[in-house]
Image: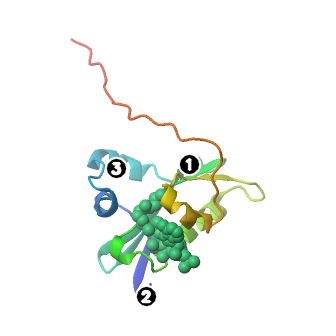
């Protein structure tokens, strides 16, 4: 943890894709990722020198709902408390920006083997199932 640099809201599309690909294979497109970074409520990234080693982000509406996405620690840096630090940064952001005195719904989606990691921060599964679709974006172009 010594000498690691934590940055807020500086995570670029290039850094996101590079880190994503260390754990999940082929990353998303530059164009989609740039738009996603622009519309993310909070981005946290961790650097060892000039190499990105971890990231996480929060999307949502600031009032009622916050959703934690893309919590990733580069494989060779896992198990050193960096994931824990990312979660701390995110929960601090929510606490700093949510309406004081209210309860805020904080959600995330986890693979079964990562559930124990999130349980450490108080998250628990409910009976809801995640439904999803990969929607193909196609627009009809008017002929002129
Ligand atoms: C999940 C992930 C972010 C954890 O990051 P990390 O830096 O290795 O975690 P830490 O070192 O901060 O560990 C914090 C605690 O969680 C525990 N932990 C970490 N990963 C765990 C797992 N998969 N299952 C159970 N416990 C886990 C650690 O043992 C540690 O416990 P302790 O505080 O009692 O010592 C990291 O493994 C990762 O990036 N994985 C690949 C990407 C991914 O799957 N992200 C999650 C998307 S759902």
Disc tally is 3
Give the crowd class for mark 2: few <14, some 14-19, many >=20 residues within 10 Å: few
Give the answer, above or below, for where 31 lies relative to 23: above
Give the crowd class for mark 1: few <14, some 14-19, many >=20 residues within 10 Å: some
Which residue is the site of mark 2? 2
Which residue is the site of mark 1? 60
Q: Position of residue 35 (x, y in %)?
A: 37, 46
Element at badge 3?
helix
The N terminus: image quadrant: bottom left
Give whichever of 61, 51 is nearer the camera: 51
Query: Which badge, 1 or 2, is on the more N-terminal residue?
Result: 2
Residue at the far bottom: name it.
2
Q: Position of residue 112 (x, y in %)?
A: 51, 56
What is the spatial separation of the Cα atoms under label 1 and label 3, in whole angstroms? 16 Å
Query: Which badge, 3 or 2, is on the more N-terminal residue?
Result: 2
Q: Which residue is rendered at x = 62% and y = 67% of the image?
A: 121
Residue at the far left: name it.
144
Element at badge 2?
loop
Query: Which badge, 1 or 3, is on the more N-terminal residue?
Result: 3
Give whichever of 109, 2 is nearer the camera: 109
Residue 21's quadrant in the figure? bottom left
Residue 74's quadrant in the figure? bottom left
Q: Is residue 84 visible?
A: no
Q: Which residue is rendered at x = 34% and y = 50% of the image?
A: 33
Q: Which residue is rendered at x = 33% and y = 30% of the image?
A: 137
Q: Position of residue 18 (x, y in %)?
A: 28, 62
Give whichever of 96, 108 is nearer the camera: 108
In this rendering, the label closer to the viewer, 1 or 2: 2
* Mark number displayed over residue 33: 3
Q: Position of residue 107 (x, y in %)?
A: 59, 52
Q: Is residue 15 visible?
A: yes
């Amino acid at each position: 943890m010594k000498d690691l640099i934590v940055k807020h809201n500086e995570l670029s599309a290039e850094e996101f894709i590079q880190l994503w690909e260390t754990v999940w294979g082929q990353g998303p497109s530059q164009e989609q990722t740039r738009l996603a970074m622009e519309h993310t409520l909070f981005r946290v990234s961790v650097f060892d020198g000039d190499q990105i080693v971890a990231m996480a982000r929060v999307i949502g509406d600031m009032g009622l709902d916050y959703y934690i996405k893309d919590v990733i620690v580069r494989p060779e840096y896992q198990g050193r408390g960096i994931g824990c630090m990312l979660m701390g940064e995110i929960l601090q952001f929510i606490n700093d920006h949510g309406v004081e005195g209210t309860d805020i719904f904080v959600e995330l989606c986890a693979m079964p083997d990562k559930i124990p990691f999130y349980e450490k921060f108080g998250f628990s599964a409910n009976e809801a199932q995640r439904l999803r679709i990969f929607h193909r974006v196609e627009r009809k172009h008017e002929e002129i």
